[in-house]
Amino acid sequence: MSSLAKAAGVFKSVDYEVFGRVQGVCFRMYTEDEARKLGVVGWVKNTRQGTVTGQVQGPEDKVNAMKAWLSKVGSPSSRIARTNFSNEKEITKLDFSGFNTRY
């Protein structure tokens, strides 16, 4: 993303779903911590199917860093099988003021 685009307030938004051993391993808590460290906003929650889903928004480089974390790192006890990303798009303003866990 160019510095001109950043100045114009262009952000990236992406939905995600993480598969594998991601429930009962503090995955949501670590996701919140990582999001706050990176400075992205959005949410995370467990699903009935045993996955973790959510949305991340922020500057493109920070969203990309979060995507890498959700795909490869996760919480220390988690085992990520795969991560699906969808609805990736540019947005002009953030829909959230922070990053939190939904129930």
Image (tube, grey):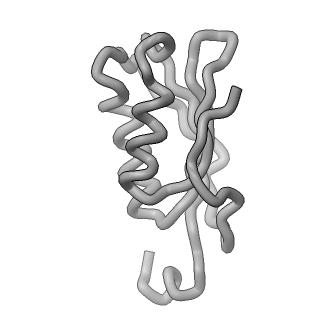
Asked if residue 39 lies left or right of residue 16, the reply is left
Q: Nearer the viewer, residue 33 or 54?
A: 33
- Residue drawn at the location 60% of the way across and 48% of the way down: 42
53 left or right, relative to 28: right
Left of 100 or right of it: where is 68?
left
Q: Position of residue 86 (x, y in %)?
A: 62, 41
Residue name at image x 51 percent, y 25 percent: 18
Residue found 61% across the figure and 34% down from its top: 101
Q: Nearer the viewer, residue 26 or 56?
A: 26
Q: Is residue 29 above or below residue 62?
A: above
Question: Which part of the image, by quadrant, shows the N terminus?
Answer: bottom left
- Of residue 12 and residue 42, the one placed in the foreground of this image is 42
- Up/down of 68 relative to 20, above or below: below
Quarter occupied by residue 3: bottom left
Where does the image place residue 76, in percent across and percent down from the top left? 28, 22
Across and down, in percent, residue 77 comes to 31, 15
Coordinates of residue 29 in the picture (x, y in percent):
46, 30
The C terminus sits in image quarter:
top right
What residue lies at 45% left-to-right and 36% top-to-bottom?
31
Total marks shown come to 0
Along the horizontal axis of the image, is 101 left or right of 34? right
Work out whether 84 lies above or below 14.
Answer: above
